[in-house]
Image (cartoon, grey):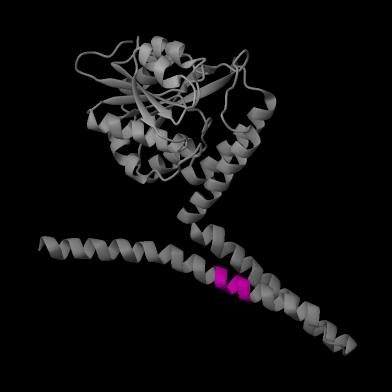
Amino acid sequence: MKSTSNVRTLALIPCYNEEDTIGSVVIKTKRYVNEVLVIDDGSVDETTKIAREAGATVIVHNKNCGKGVAIKTGFQYALQKNYDYVVTIDGDGQHNPAEISAVLGNLMNNGHDISLGFRQKDATEMPGWRKIGKKVLDYATSFGNGGYVTDSQCGFRAFNKKAIQSITPRLNSDAFCIESEQLIRAHELGLEITETNVSCRYKDLKNTSTKDPASHGFSVLRYLIWLVAERRPLLFIGVPGFILVILGLLLGILTLQSYNISGVFPISHALLCSVFLIIGALAMFMGLMLNVLPHIINKTRDEEGAYGNY
């Protein structure tokens, strides 16, 4: 499905040392979009040269900044060039560019804002251990997204102009966490997400990740926990604090009972009780303040805007 003259589409390919595959990916991708943009994120091989020879526009980062930064660079380019739709696809050959028609078409035809590639079980070569890790990250993303996401880590997805304009200023991740953050920010903004079945290759590919999968997974999970805690401080900080206070009170009661029975005051129990109570009370206070402050700040901004307009 080549874009029509009235609808302009851009394929965004973030790359880091992908000289073995980028040429083929660019050539195949060009058939389905108006322009292919490669973001060379500090490669030390021939990625830039090969991508340009294959017909791509290339933006080069002088150093490796991370996939998140590369994606944001591409989004900003799309906004500057006034593209209607952007499809992101990896440069390592995992994704099939022929499926761009389906991913973009599903977005163009149904009025949604984001079309998320869903790597089907019977159409993917993903190893079992990767599937387990993906499942964990899917659930973690879903917890912050407000609904279950079937494939939060798939980099094959499409966005309309509204989605790009809305989420780009809100993206903070500079690494592989960018895929999950896009979905969480989209949920915050009320953007509509649909899913499109896609295939995925792993066999016979030299390297499907520039980072160790285990460290990749843990870094994404760590960022997700921080991101969700930022959005729900009462749940992630206040509730654990409340639990610590309850444990501290129960331990205090047991300490007093032990003292009444034996006549010996258990100092270690008393110290532990104090630690639980102090940390728990501080966590409850922090959770409450972090939950209230954003509302106060937003209300103040709205009032200042109203008075300014007046």
Q: Quadrant of the N terminus?
A: top left
User: In the depicted view, which residue is nearer to us: 180 or 169?
Assistant: 169
Q: Inspect this view and state whether residue 157 appears.
A: yes
Q: Quadrant of the C terminus?
A: bottom left
- Compared to 184, does 27 lie above or below? above
Q: Residue at x 45, y 31 (%)?
A: 42
Q: Position of residue 224 (x, y in %)?
A: 53, 46
Q: Position of residue 303 (x, y in %)?
A: 21, 65
Looking at the rendered structure, the number of numbered marks drawn on it comes to 0
| Magenta region, residue range | 278-283
- Compared to 123, does 246 lie above or below? below
Q: Inspect this view and state whether residue 254 appears.
A: no
Say if the magenta span includes residue 193: no
Q: Residue at x 56, y 68 (%)?
A: 283
Farthest residue to the bottom: give it. Answer: 263
Q: Main secondary structure of the magenta part?
A: helix
